[in-house]
Amino acid sequence: MSTPLPAEAGMSAANRRQVQEALRRLDYYRGRADGVFGQRTRAAIRRFQQTIGAETTGTLTADEADLLVSIP
């Protein structure tokens, strides 16, 4: 099992790229996995949050990030 991801505020650039890659794999995001959470990444996070029934803040909690990257 992989190391749990922190909440967004504690994420490294590598963690952020991992999140973007997961969002892209799941078809929420079409941008580059550059580690920068801009408008397109925020919109993708909100769509993911809506899908899982979470509050659509556009900012990931640790649990949401872990869930996101664990989806095959």
Image (tube, grey):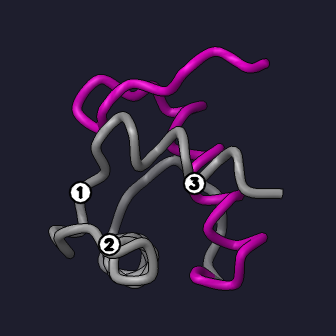
Query: Answer yes or no: do the residues labelled 2 and 1 have beta carbons within 8 Å?
Result: yes
Mark 2: secondary structure? helix
Q: Which residue is mark 1?
A: 59
Q: Which residue is mark 3?
A: 68
Residue 11 drawn at (x, y percent): 39, 28
Q: Residues within 10 Å of mark 1 (few under 14, many from 20)?
A: some
Q: Residue at x 72, y 75 (%)?
A: 26
Residue 43 drawn at (x, y percent): 34, 82
Q: Which mark is residue 42?
A: 2
Q: Quadrant of residue 63?
A: top left
Under mark 3, the amino acid is: Leu
Q: Residue at x 70, y 58 (%)?
A: 21
Image-based side of 34 in relation to 25, left or right:
left
Cα gap from disc 1 to disc 3, whole angstroms: 13 Å
Q: Earlier in the sequence, mark 3 or mark 2?
A: 2
Let me know if residue 38 is in the magenta part. Answer: no
Cα gap from disc 2 to disc 1, whole angstroms: 7 Å
30, 23: nearer the viewer = 23
Which numbered mark, 3 or 2, is in the foreground of this view? Answer: 3
Q: Residue at x 65, y 47 (%)?
A: 69
Indicate the quadrant containing the N terminus: top left, top right, bottom left or bottom right: top right
Indicate the quadrant containing the C terminus: top left, top right, bottom left or bottom right: bottom right
Residue 70 drawn at (x, y percent): 70, 45
Residues drawn in magenta: 1-29
Callout count: 3
Q: Residues within 10 Å of mark 3 (few under 14, many from 20)?
A: many
